[in-house]
Image (tube, rainbow, N blue to C red):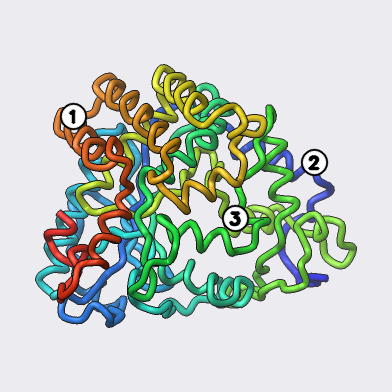
Amino acid sequence: MIGLTAEGSPLRDASEVGDYAGRCFRSTGDDRVGVELEFLVFDRTSAARHVPMDRVERALPPLPGGSRVTFEPGGQLELSGPAGSLAGAIDGLTADVAAARQALARDGLVLAGVGLDPMRPAVRQLQQPRYDAMAEFLGRPYGALMMCSTASIQVNLDLGEQPRTRWERAHLLGPVLTAAFANSPLSRGRPCGWMSGRQAVWEHLDPTRTAPVPVSADPVADWARYLLDARVMLVREDEDRCRAVRDGSTFRDWLGSRERPPTAEDLAYHATTVFPPVRPRGWLEIRFLDAQRTADWPVCVAVTHALISDDRTADAALAAVESCLGPRWRRGSGPERATWAAAAHRGLSDPRLARAADACFRAAIEALPRLGATPALIGEVAAFADRYVTTGRSPAADLMDLVRQPGRRLPAWLTDEGQS
């Protein structure tokens, strides 16, 4: 089936996958926040032109907050800030975003905080073995769109003293957060039919690696089962070569192979190729949030942290969500997959999701002072709630409004007006 050579001892059976899954939920008891921001980069003089990645690299200065700079396959810029307290993580990354924006502006470039490229086709710039195999496995058009045309905010949260509880909260509140921060309604210059077109792209990819993890009372068993049942995307033949696996085989199939069973290294690598909305890695990766305007991403981080990490806030939010959405919105300890899709499709134009989001934001705003948020950040969260949540608008609604304006030469999301 796979038939490749690899260093290391073969895994004996599925119990070793369970052991690996258990390590993914091993908590340090800390309560840090980490943030990874992705941005699409545009040329201010020609929004339809793809910006070469090396042009962005040359323009970037050393960043004062210590963020790591990387690029996604389509040239999307990613800034990954050091983990720390809520205030510390946001302050450091805010300084780095400001420095990057100013430097890129001097070269005629602009960062666009939007979840899906609203006008350009998918073009891959990074030619690496992993990405070559990934592109072959995922195919077109959605694989190319995911790799080259999407941008997100990833919020990384420690598991705290009760990993299972935070795992459940991240799933239960995920659809409401998806709707509240939906910000990608356009593709190729037209409405794509979803408030979060980025999530729509994920909906059309291999569901064994992109669907939410089914949540039960045993997150370790749930994660182990997910890893076993996910299709193998690629295997590394050596340092410089990867090969896509196109026969539909799962990791469970590979584990039973007599030809060459997988090793612990193969399992760890396989885990990096599955992309559920929430992924455990010794912390929680919150992966379902669209990129936001440069002024709004701290709001996204603060609200997500408050709702998942603070017990009092989470209890109030979950009670409100169940009241608004009804008892049937969830299955066991996680929402129905249809609930995730509805959130991405309609955003806060769904009245039930709007009411739930309003209650969640009110609970988060009440919690932020005791979580160390600055008065300025609390004010930003309140202003975002007033502008969007209480009026039943996702940020995507602003982009839809721009499409309807005749005669605009440069969309506002490419200008300081749209990003500040």
Q: Nearer the viewer, residue 237 or 280?
A: 280
Nearer-N-terminus badge (1/3): 3
Question: Which residue corresponds to mark 2?
Answer: 15
Residue 88, given in percent of the width and then of the height, sits at 25, 36
* Location of residue 418 (image quadrant): bottom left
Residue type at mark 1 is: Thr
Q: Residue at horizontal 61%, vertical 45%?
A: 337
Q: Residue at horizontal 21%, vertical 76%?
A: 43
Question: Which residue corresponds to mark 3?
Answer: 210
Front of the two marks 1 and 3: 3
**Label 3 to label 2, Cα distance in Å?**
23 Å
Q: Nearer the viewer, residue 122 or 362?
A: 362
Residue type at mark 3 is: Thr
Q: Residue at horizontal 43%, vertical 71%?
A: 148
- Tag shown at residue 374: 1
Quadrant where the C terminus sits is: bottom left
Residue 82, given in percent of the width and then of the height, sits at 32, 44
Indicate the secondary structure of the residue bearing disc 1: loop
**Label 1 to label 3, Cα distance in Å?**
35 Å
